[in-house]
Image (cartoon, rainbow, N blue to C red):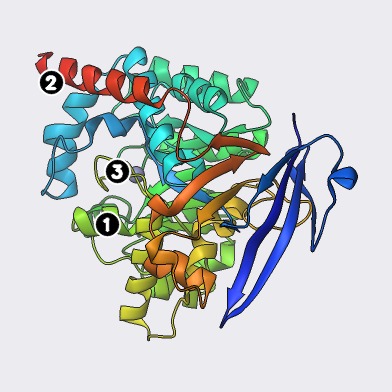
Amino acid sequence: MSKILLKSALIEATRGKSVRRDILIAGGRFQKIAATISAEEAGDCEVVDSSNFAVLPAFYNGHTHAAMTLLRGYADDMELSRWLNEYIWPMEAKLRPADIRIASRLAVLEMIKSGTVFFADMYWHHDETLKVVEEMGVRATIGLSMADLLQPPEEIEKSFAFLVAHTGESERVKLAVMPHAVYTVSEALLKRCFAVAKAENYLVHTHLSETRQEVENCQKQYGCTPPQLLARLGGLNDKLIAAHCVHFTPEDRRIFAAAGATAITNPCSNLKLASGMPQINELLAAGIRVGIGTDGASSNNSLDMHDDMKLAALIAKVSGSAETLPAREALEMATVRVAEAYGLNAGVIAEGKLADCLLIDLSAESMVPCYDLVSNWVYAADSRCIDSVICNGKFIMRGRHVDGEEDIRCEAAACAARLVQTP
Ligand SMILES: [Zn+2]
């Protein structure tokens, strides 16, 4: 059965005034939202009593490294450069394609259970992650990761061939060009990435100005900041989606906003690695579109967008005022802002939009009382209040159960145990 009729779902509650609607999902979209939709009008469909649910947009994770979920908790409590050089990169060198598949399944499971239906992924062996996305029913923009200071040249050529052929793109999967960062990608390769993205109409996603050291080294090597380097090489435009953007100068923010580029803030990761305080309020004040990402589970250490959404709202207030980044805008940064940046007509519950949503359990303690639905969701609740997740018009979690979840957890635990014993 491809149609779903959600009956009497709460879609708004503000100061005691609540709005309930029937929502008809068909053809992967919200086809009709009205006070009443009869079963006859809906046609052959599954009717779901949603009187105990609020329907809210699902999360769109603007920056992660899904397969790094296998390295969760492997190295903590140290700054980025030592964390990468001494722990993460040596461990990653042991990962085989089969391990990436296991790790990606664990990541997608964690994302679904915490309400995420889309992620932008920057990692190696992208074809394994791509298959997992197709199988598990979510959406993704899968990166062809480029880092010539870490990768052999033949791998880079393979990635460009993949991009030029648009291999694996589908209704739910898109590709993107993802040069890792200005400190792992040469000037020549950055230029080539931007040229291929332009020719093949791809988005470009990269880490940018994550740490003070990155900015200082860029100044030493190139005589400018990382965003200024991208501008010089032809990569600062409205196709650029940059993760972190923690150490922008006022001039960086000005040129980034003027170019129409998108910033993805990763507050948990930035704070945990002590990379710096995310400039959320400053980026927004400069007129930049800002979305939220979790970063990888080895630096966050979870893929739960709810945590990053709440933290982003709190951080923005510290550098602004209590009125800065109200709950609704924080929710938009975790949903529609990311969807827009990655070219998805999604992230809001409205007719014609892609049918991605969460059914939130209104009987959960943190949802009671419900003066304001969005306030409860952003500030009080957490992802345990999510009963079900719909992506592309289909249930991918129902009653908090995801098909095959026990196997995914066992497989990942066994794989991690094997990896630590491998010299
Ligand atoms: Zn990252």
Q: Is mark 3 on a helix, strand or loop?
A: loop
Rounded to the nearest whole Å, what is the CA distance between mark 2 and mark 1?
Answer: 26 Å
Q: Which of marks 1 and 3 is in front?
A: 1
Residue 388 visible somewhere in the drawing: yes
> Does 26 appear above or below 359?
above
Q: Looking at the image, tell me whether mark 1 or mark 3 is earlier in sequence order.
A: 3
Q: Residue at horizontal 30%, vertical 55%?
A: 210
Say few, some or many: other residues with alpha carbon within 10 Å of mark 2 (under 14 / 14 to 19 / 20 or more). Answer: few
Rounded to the nearest whole Å, what is the CA distance between mark 3 and mark 2?
Answer: 28 Å
Residue in front for this viewpoint, 385 or 106: 385
Q: Are marks 3 and 2 in contact (CB under 8 Å)?
A: no
Say few, some or many: other residues with alpha carbon within 10 Å of mark 3 (under 14 / 14 to 19 / 20 or more). Answer: some
Relative placement, left or right, of 32 versus 54 is: right
Residue linked to disc 3: 183
Q: Residue at horizontal 73%, vertical 39%?
A: 28
Quadrant in which residue 378 is drawn: bottom left
Say few, some or many: other residues with alpha carbon within 10 Å of mark 1 (under 14 / 14 to 19 / 20 or more). Answer: many
Residue 216 in the image: x percent, y percent? 23, 58
Looking at numbered disc 1 in the image, what kind of residue is underneath it?
Asn
The quadrant of the picture occupied by the N terminus is: top right
Relative placement, left or right, of 367 versus 185 is: right
Tag of residue 420: 2
Q: What element carries label 2?
A: helix
Q: Residue at horizontal 63%, vertical 26%?
A: 169
Residue linked to disc 1: 270
Residue 84 in the image: x percent, y percent? 19, 38
Residue 236 visible somewhere in the drawing: no
Q: In which quarter of the image is ligand 1?
A: top left
